[in-house]
Image: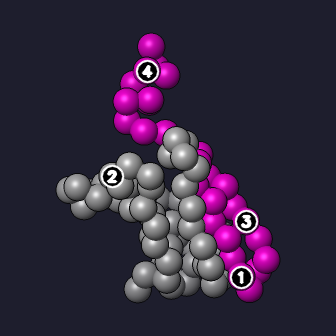
Amino acid sequence: MIAAMCLNRDGDLVATASEKGTLIRLTNALNGLVLYEFRRGSDAADISQLIFDQQTTKIAVASSNKQTIHIFIVVKEGDMQNAKK
C-alpha cells in the first residue's frame, strides 16, 4: 500500500512511499515506469511528507515517528547522459 505520494513541479514524476516507510519509488507519471527506488532504512517509519525541490534534483522524505528527514539525489535521464560526456 502507498502511505504518501507527491508530484514534482512539472507533473512528470510521482514519488510514493511504502506503508512500511522503507522504500521510496519515483515513477514516470506518463507511462507508469518505475525510474528510481530509494531505501530509507530497514526499520518501519511513518512517512509524513515527500517533497521535490523546484528543479527535481532532490527529494526529501520526512518521517513523523522517527523524527528524521532523508534527502535523495534525483538524476534525470538527460542529466545522466550529459554527465557521462
Q: Give me the disc on residue 69.
A: 3
**SS category of the residue bearing label 4:** helix
Disc 4 + disc 1, Cβ < 8 Å: no
Q: Tag 2 or tag 4, which sits nearer the N-term? A: 2
Callout 3 crowding tier (Cα within 10 Å): few <14, some 14–19, many ≥20? some
Question: Amino acid type of disc 2?
Answer: Asp
Whole-percent x, y for residue 14 in the image? 39, 62
Residue with the mark numbered 4? 82
Amino acid found under the numbered disc labelled 4: Asn
C-alpha separation, residue under disc 3 versus residue under disc 4: 29 Å
The boundaries of the magenta stretch are 58-85
Q: Is residue 70 magenta?
A: yes
Q: CA distance from mark 4 to mark 1?
A: 37 Å
Q: Quadrant of residue 70?
A: bottom right
Residue beneath the point at 45% across and 13% down:
85
Between discs 3 and 1, the one toward the N terminus: 1
Measure the C-alpha gap from mark 4 to mark 2.
Answer: 20 Å
Vertical order, 69 against 45 (above or below): above
Q: Is residue 36 visible?
A: no
User: How many residues crowd mark 1 within 10 Å: few (<14), some (14–19), many (20+)?
Assistant: few
User: Which mark's residue is nearer the viewer, 4 or 2?
Assistant: 2
What is the number of callouts on the image? 4
Residue, disc 1: 64
